[in-house]
């Protein structure tokens, strides 16, 4: 059974129309990550949560926001999607220590039209 | 700052042949190193990881990798390629024993397996 679940798997949004991607986990992990992966590129970390502590990467645009209402759920909000934001967005989780395995969801493909 | 370089964006092998995917890292502290596989339209799956224990690491599906500090390398190998191994492979380095453990990925290598 999937342990990191992302919804929707495929999302089409209009230029400038806000969109929210969701991630849920059944692992009770305290660390959750959001990565952006553009076509034929490596995943790039946007931000992560350690419990409720939010950590934004220095080069993550302000257009990207995140919410984590509880341990199990994390949301990625894109306030005004541009054509350059079309990508796959990967959610991942990890239990506490840095040696522990990071588990990835299947990803959410975002298309901006 | 830590970084990872994967040599060769595309590697093609015949079914049954040796697979060798190259990865070199840069790190000012002892690194944690990982190999992930990504099938089309899917997330990343961990193949194996090095966390300063044995330098030869065995992973799933007969993959293994050897950490060589003198060469700053962590190349991935598999003795005999299978058609199902065709995928994108990412080498990654972790920032180390801090709390975040965030991964910094290489650019990826596409493995093609020919019948």
Image (spheres, helix red, strand yellow):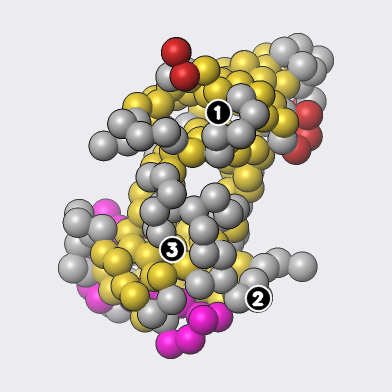
Could you tell me residue B27's position as x and y percent?
34, 31
Nearest to the observer: residue B61 or residue B71 = B71
* Label 2: element kind: loop
Using the numbered discs, state the Cα–Cα distance from disc 2 to disc 1 in whole angstroms: 31 Å
Q: Chain of mark 2?
A: A
Nearest to the observer: residue B62 or residue B12 = B62
Q: Does residue B51 belong to the magenta stretch? A: no
Asked if one can make out residue B37 in the rendered structure from this viewpoint, the answer is no
Left of B56 or right of it: where is B68?
left
Give me the residue at 38% from left, 80% from top.
A52
Could you tell me residue A103's position as x and y percent?
59, 58
Q: Quadrant of the rendered structure where residue B96 is?
A: top left
Residue, disc 2: A26
Residue stretch rendered in magenta on the structure: A69-87
Left of B111 or right of it: where is A82?
left
Residue, disc 1: B110
Left of B52 or right of it: where is B98?
left
Give me the residue at 66% from left, 39% from top.
B47
Q: Are marks 2 and 3 on the same chain?
A: yes
Q: Is residue B24 above or below residue B98?
A: above
Q: Chain of mark 3?
A: A
Using the numbered discs, state the Cα–Cα distance from disc 3 to disc 1 in whole angstroms: 24 Å
Give me the residue at 38% from left, 45% from top.
B95
């Amino acid at each position: 059974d999937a342990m990191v679940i992302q919804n929707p798997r495929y999302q089409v949004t209009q230029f400038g129309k806000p969109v929210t991607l969701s991630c849920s986990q059944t692992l009770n992990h305290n660390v959750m990550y959001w990565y952006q992966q553009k076509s034929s590129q490596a995943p790039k970390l946007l931000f992560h949560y350690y419990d409720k502590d939010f950590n934004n990467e220095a080069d993550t645009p302000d257009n990207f926001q995140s919410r984590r209402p509880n341990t199990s759920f994390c949301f990625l909000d894109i306030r005004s999607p541009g054509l350059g934001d079309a990508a796959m967005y990967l959610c991942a989780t990890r239990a506490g220590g840095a040696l522990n395995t990071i588990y990835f969801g299947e990803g959410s493909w975002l298309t901006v039209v | 700052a830590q970084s990872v370089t994967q040599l060769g964006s595309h590697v093609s092998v015949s079914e049954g042949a040796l697979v060798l995917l190259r990865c070199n890292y840069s790190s000012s502290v002892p690194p944690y190193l990982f190999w992930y596989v990504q099938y089309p339209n899917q997330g990343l799956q961990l193949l194996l990881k090095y966390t300063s224990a044995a330098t030869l690491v065995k992973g799933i599906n007969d993959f293994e990798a050897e950490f060589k500090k003198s060469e700053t390398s962590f190349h991935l190998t598999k003795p005999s390629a299978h058609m199902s191994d065709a995928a994108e492979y990412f080498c990654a380095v972790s920032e180390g024993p801090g709390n975040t453990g965030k991964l910094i990925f290489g650019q990826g290598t596409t493995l093609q397996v020919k019948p």
